Amino acid sequence: MVTQSADSEASIALVWFRRDLRLFDHAALYHALKEYDQVIPVFVFDPTILTILPRADRRVEFIHASLRALKDELQQAKSDLVIRHANPVTAILELVAEFRASAVYTNRDYEPDAIKRDTEVTAALREQGIALRTFKDQVIFEQDEIVTQANTQLAAQPFPSLQELNFEPAGLADLPVQAGTTGSEALFENFKERIDRYHLNRDFPAVKGPSYLSVHLRFGTLSIRELAAYAWREGSQGAQTWLSELIWREFYQQILWHRPDVVHHAFKQDYDALAFSNDEALFTAWCQGQTGYPMVDAAMRQLNQTGYMHNRLRMITASFLVKDLLVDWRWGERYFAKQLIDFDLASNNGGWQWAASTGCDAQPYFRIFNPVTQSTKFDSDGKFIRRYCPELSALQGKAIHAPWLANQTTLAAAGVTLGVDYPWPIVDHACQRDKALALFKHRGRTP
Ligand code: FAD
């Protein structure tokens, strides 16, 4: 029973919610409820994080809405959520004193800053004779649970059979996304109707193919165990492909845990000092969706307008920034981190390093996406491009993928004047491709 009434005889523990904003299948809450008479749920807003986010940040709104829902749910259970705006070390110490708690329970977070914070909280609590007890919750595998047989390097393949794991979710369940567990349940129910076709549809941004659950996975408004167990049981080709995507998420969490240096450096160290040109005007055009390559521009506008970008488009835009515009992947990573509602340090860094060919199990550097071919293949009738680049919507046929190749009559008929309504391409793909190949080939050496 979750309760907030302090009684002098009772043993009391705090449960500190962070990226696990739900009550069902919640490891720390489960253990605290089992081991203590009274459990006080708490959440701490760290004001230093809030000052680095833009004032109207989608993620802050998502957290607020999810916390409101969590608080309501707890109140219905005759409990409550105690929310503090303070430095986490100070806040947790104060809460422990206020509620006379003898332990703090929480789920582990594997980001380097979070590890640093938890180390500080552990030390401060220890001085009071109180333990910070942490649990695995946001991943299926953590820390050293997955390494190669040689125990040396991680690989995407060696994840053991999920069948051997005991998944027992404890119970209960188009963007902009509805927050909280109600939001995640509605999305997941909808996705269950489509999961069997996931492998067929997931690459086409104009089609409702993926689950759109990433923001819920980020803030723990659903249980990864419940998702994995469902996909495992479902077993169709679509479900298996989706499960393998959940495993990519696990993989990148493991990389971050074992190699926290990837936050600033290439996973493959000889790719760390690539001499990118870093042209600021090209970077700005990319950020604004004004590169003259419609698929890239539509994708960047989707990101800017909604805070979400389809996975295929994340790969295309990341490859374009690094290998067509020759801009350091870290610039793009930072921009995504600012814009994405589902921003997750491990997956974002992993995705960028994959596309930039600097990461573990990454795209080889000589595989360079052609943005026009990608567009023709994955948005063949230009439906997605038309949604986000309305100035091109009247273009017919192939012209939607490469307007600069269309003749004057086609452009005039669609009311498009290049350089006025829509930009000329800011770079020539074939020429930039050669430069990228030379850059990567001679990495660390003067060509
Ligand atoms: P679905 O296709 O329904 O997949 C289900 C879940 O599996 C996702 O929610 C996600 O948790 C996980 N997943 C799927 N693909 C990947 C992947 N390639 N890597 C890691 N996890 C994956 N994902 C984030 O959650 N946060 C990020 O900040 C992020 N940044 C990315 C940056 C780049 C450059 C790239 C190439 C990929 C990035 N991804 C990121 C991975 C992926 O694009 C998103 O997880 C996915 O598009 C989210 O949509 P969905 O929930 O509908 O995915």
Image: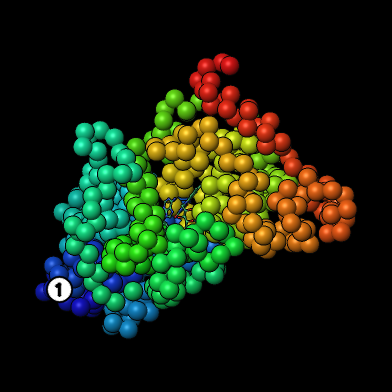
- The N terminus, quarter of image: bottom left
Residue reaching furthest to the left: 9
Q: Where is residue 190 in the image (x, y as percent from the top left)?
A: 45, 74
- The C terminus, quarter of image: top right
Q: In this view, does 233 lie above or below 405?
A: below
Q: Which of 47 and 315 is in front in this view?
A: 315
Residue reaching furthest to the top: 446
Question: Which residue is drawn at the image coordinates 47% and 54% (left, top)?
Answer: 343
Q: Where is residue 277 in the image (x, y as percent from the top left)?
A: 63, 29
SS class, disc 1:
loop
Q: Which of 94 and 12 is in front in this view?
A: 12
Q: Position of residue 363 (x, y in %)?
A: 47, 38
What residue would you read off at disc 1?
37
Q: Nearer the viewer, residue 429 or 79?
A: 429
The reply, left or right, for residue 240 in relation to residue 49 is left
Q: Is residue 2 above or below residue 120?
A: below
Amino acid carrying mark 1 in the image: Asp
Q: Which of 400 and 5 is in front in this view?
A: 400
Question: Which residue is drawn at the image coordinates 74% and 42% (left, top)?
Answer: 425
The reply, left or right, for residue 227 in relation to residue 66 is left
- The image quadrant where one finds ligand 1 is bottom left
